Image (cartoon, rainbow, N blue to C red):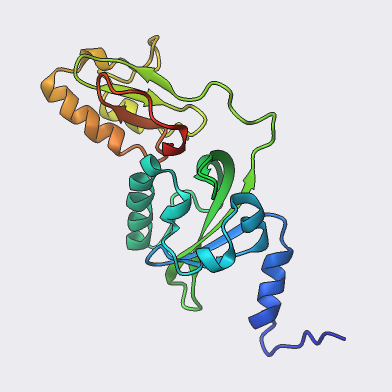
Amino acid sequence: MTSWSTADGVLTGEYAGWALDSATDAIIVIDEQGLVRAWNRACVDLFGWSKEFAIGRDVDFMIPEKLREAHHRGFSSAMARGGLASDGQARRTKSLREDGVSIYIEMTFAALRNDEGVMIGAVAVARPLSERDIPTHGRKRYTGPLVDVTFDSALCNHNGQCVRNMPEVFDTSRRPWINPAVADAELALRLRTTVGNCPTGALQIAEVGAPDDDPAAG
């Protein structure tokens, strides 16, 4: 018979591992440097990478290339202030699988804290979107003379940052609501910054004349 007695009621060692691997959702724990410290069996099923591959590796390997900058910026800011802006709130995002295909997932993030309440990393719980919830329209491209903007509505959390910072280009009362055609040389620089600060990667810059990115790029 398994003995569950512990001094403080906290699961440790093999018990904690059993609990993680019994969960049907993918659970990922990363430390303050963004390195993977826990990767349960559901992660292997969903993303393909083995536990031996993932543990100790920068979590970048599962983030589409064009979403990595937003991830690093958001995680660094969270560690600096000791909390996540999306703590406990599920949001739709994209991830890479081992075979290189990008997939839509629903992910919930929470700050990982020690006994003193200090944030020492983060916990993410992921599950695949249902067939009904998977977007079919993909990323839409809006063209301008100096720079193009692409938008994936499935990733947008509608915080309005782009509209507040650059109403000249982003105006939800207008159709199309994104209009990079108005951006002269000065505005184009601001536009690159505004798009680069998109917290979810829903907005991305595309160079004029460049082909659409591979879906795995985000």
Q: Is residue 131 visible?
A: yes
Q: Quadrant of residue 176?
A: top left
Q: Nearer the viewer, residue 197 or 208?
A: 208
Q: Nearer the viewer, residue 6 or 24?
A: 24
Q: List the single residue furthest toward the front.
A: 99
Query: Where's residue 184, x and y in %?
Result: 14, 17
Quadrant that contains the N terminus: bottom right
Query: Where's residue 193, x and y in %?
Result: 23, 35
Q: Give the residue drawn at x 12%, y 21%.
A: 185
- Vertical order, 13 against 174 (above or below): below
In the figure, is residue 171 to the left or right of 182? right
Q: Nearer the viewer, residue 68 or 57?
A: 57
Q: List the single residue furthest toward the left.
A: 186
Q: Give the residue drawn at x 39%, y 67%.
A: 32
Q: Give the residue drawn at x 36%, y 45%.
A: 70
Q: Nearer the viewer, residue 191 or 118?
A: 191
Q: List the single residue furthest toward the bottom.
A: 7
Query: Where's residue 186, x and y in %?
Result: 11, 24
Q: Give the residue drawn at x 71%, y 70%.
A: 19
- Vertical order, 112 against 75 (above or below): below
